[in-house]
Amino acid sequence: MNPNQSIVAIYPTHLAAEAAVKELQQSGFDMKKLSIVGRDYHTDEHVVGYYNAGDRMNVWGRRGAFWGWIWGCLFGSAFFLIPGIGPLVVAGPLVGWLVGALETAVVVSGLSALGAGLFSLGIPKDSILQYETALKTDKFLLIVHGSAAEISAAREAVSRTKPENLQHHQ
């Protein structure tokens, strides 16, 4: 059995995703093992954002306060423009996995760069397509990665927040 597993939850709004992050935080979960992905619609015509591995990302948009709070909790943040999905804001260790997939030119048949990053975690292609579709419809993904014991505790905490969908990947 793979010692590292993950759960992926889909939330309809940034407020619901924020509640899940807070639930995990209050449960004592290691926030370095948590990633969140979502689209951000910018009210300004000029999008400002940059990838910075060890610090925070600066970005202005309608959900700026939400992303600012998330970046304060999670390590690493980035803004990606993914063809077919659009602008994505990513926080947590998923940033490193996505950058790794882009830097090593990992190509997984029919998947975006986001999909390739998720695939490298062991998430099956059919689930990845479901997650990409959720992002295209302005939903948020919460991804928790860890040992079987950590994932069991995280799954219990996340379940309390009533996500639209919650899947466990081994």
Image (cartoon, rainbow, N blue to C red):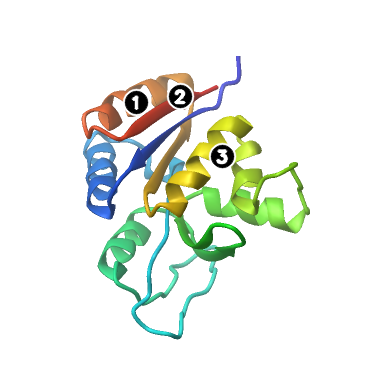
What secondary structure is marked by label 3?
A: helix
Q: Is disc 2 surrounded by few (<14), some (14 to 19) or many (20+) residues within 10 Å?
A: some
In this rendering, is residue 146 above or below 52?
Answer: above
x, y (%) of residue 48?
46, 80
x, y percentage for residue 85? 54, 57
**Left or right of 30, for residue 93:** right
Distance between mark 1 and mark 3 Cα atoms: 21 Å
- Work out how far the residue at label 3 is from the one at label 2, CA to CA, in angstroms: 15 Å
Q: Residue at x 24, y 32 (%)?
A: 162
Label ID, residue 129: 3
Q: Quadrant of the N terminus?
A: top right
In this rendering, the answer to whether 107 lies above or below 167 is: below
What is the three-letter code of the residue carrying label 1?
Arg
Pointer 1 with pointer 2, Cβ within 8 A: yes
Residue 102 position, x and y percent, is 70, 56
Density class for disc 1 (Cα within 10 Å; few <14, some 14-19, many ≥20) is many
The reply to whether the C-beta atoms of the residues labelled 3 and 2 are less than 8 Å apart is: no
Q: Earlier in the sequence, mark 1 or mark 3?
A: 3
How many neighbours does mark 3 have within 10 angstroms: few (below 14), some (14-19), or many (20 or more)?
A: some
Disc with the residue nearer the chain's start (1 vs 2)? 1
**Amino acid marked by disc 3:** Leu
Residue that label 1 marks: 155
In what element is the residue under mark 1? helix
**Image quadrant assignment for residue 121:** top right
Residue pointed to by mark 2: 168
Q: Nearer the viewer, residue 157 or 40?
A: 40
Describe residue 93's horizontal placement relative to residue 73 as left or right.
right
Please name which of the two marks, 1 or 3, marks the residue nearer to the observer: 3
- Tell me which residue sits at (53%, 68%) in the image: 52
Q: Are marks 1 and 3 in contact (CB under 8 Å)?
A: no
Q: Residue 38 location in percent, x, y?
A: 41, 55
Question: Can residue 29 be seen at all in this image of the molecule?
Answer: yes
